[in-house]
Amino acid sequence: MTFADLGLSVELLRAVNDSGYNEPTPIQRAAIPSVLMGKDLIGIAQTGTGKTAGFVLPMIDILHHGRSRARMPRSLILEPTRELAMQVAENFEKYGKYHPLSMALLMGGVQMGDQVKTLEKGVDVLIATPGRLMDLFQRGKIMLNDCNLLVIDEADRMLDMGFIPDIEEICSKLPKSRQTLLFSATMPPPIQKLAAKFLNDPKRVEVARPATANVNIEQRLVEVSADKKKDVLKELLRADEVRNAIVFCNRKTTVRELASSLRRAHLAAGQIQGDMDQAQRIAEFERFKAGDINILVASDVAARGLDVKGVSHVFNFDVPWQPDDYVHRIGRTGRAGATGIAITLASKSDGELVDRIEKLTGQKIARCGKPVKAAEAKSETPVREPKPRAPKAASKAEEARPKADRSPVVEDINGEWNGPMPSFLSVSAG
């Protein structure tokens, strides 16, 4: 099947062809015809399956007929994070190049005044995070009574971030006769309840078992003591097969410290984490995309927002606390049919977290042992890494740190393993 078989316009097919795509993915084949017919839809698919293009492409053709009015967007796409909102905007720019549609982004970290000015001109497509949208709505800067097409993207992530009450309020302010599309990697009970309340006889499309990792990703687990993780990571990053990589950490403080350590080791590393403002994040994305740096250290704020084409490796410097986050993290590689490698560094204290991941995904992660012996691990830089501290009572500085920024997992420092990642990003189609 080709994109031409899905009923898309000639202009849209031309834009898709310009982007280098010939065959639709399973989620696109299943979703696009139903969306073009005006049906409500529930799409269950992992990131990296092309689901974004699955709603962006038909929306462009639907919105081609009609006209926008000031402060009254014709369609609304809700995204849980700023990064994801930017990804969708990139898709509209790429595929809508032959359609005269107007678009606006509403998200934190950007001047509200500029966003209001764009809305006053009238927009066909409004891409928003729930918080900023609710803020502008309460200020009377936007009206939703002319919005006839709603997309709720990454619904399970919305649930994790506490956005479901906002989404329910937003839905209640939209026309009841609208078309609604809901996409989610999983369908926990709260999302099922949301769908039952706000979707009308939806078509359900599921292209992969929830929480199943991409088969194009080779998963490895490196068994290493906690005090040697930095040294081991540096050795792995220097391997010839690593063209570029995203390194995930559980805490933003770890992101900052690890990125600095990698730079001191003469590795081209940048970072993205929650304390950075939007301009800084965009700058780091651009550096990574352009190849100025080939390593991006990230916290989970970016786990579902990074969609950079051609990432060869993902590293979990910390085993994620939530098993779902493991699937989303490693999904930054092996996209659009390409292969990728995901490597997780785990110490003895991570055993339970690893067990939960394997239970969720239904597969055992291949153990690789220690690529660098603890006594032989060295850094190829004259700058010496700080010596690991023996376990002791928390310092005053540690006690003063907010509890939310501490790991709930107590690491065994000397333990050994006992068990057997405006100007928008260049992205793949979806």
Image (cartoon, rainbow, N blue to C red):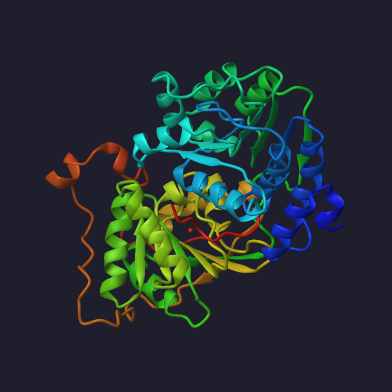
Instruction: Check the picture and name the quadrant holding the N terminus.
Output: bottom right
Q: Residue furthest left?
A: 396
Left or right of residue 203: residue 346? left
Left or right of residue 55: residue 22? right
- Residue 167 lies in what quarter of the image? top right
The spot of residue 408 in percent (x, y) is 36, 42
The spot of residue 419 in percent (x, y) is 52, 60
The spot of residue 180 in percent (x, y) is 69, 29
- Residue 382 lies in what quarter of the image? bottom left
Q: In the rendered image of this protein, does residue 169 appear above or below residue 35?
A: above
Whether residue 367 is visible, yes or no, is yes
Left or right of residue 395: residue 110? right
* Residue visible at 79% across and 38% down in the picture: 36
The spot of residue 320 in percent (x, y) is 46, 50
Q: In the rendered image of this protein, does residue 167 appear above or below residue 182?
A: above
Give the camera-side residue of 224 and 274: 274
Whether residue 346 is visible, yes or no, is no
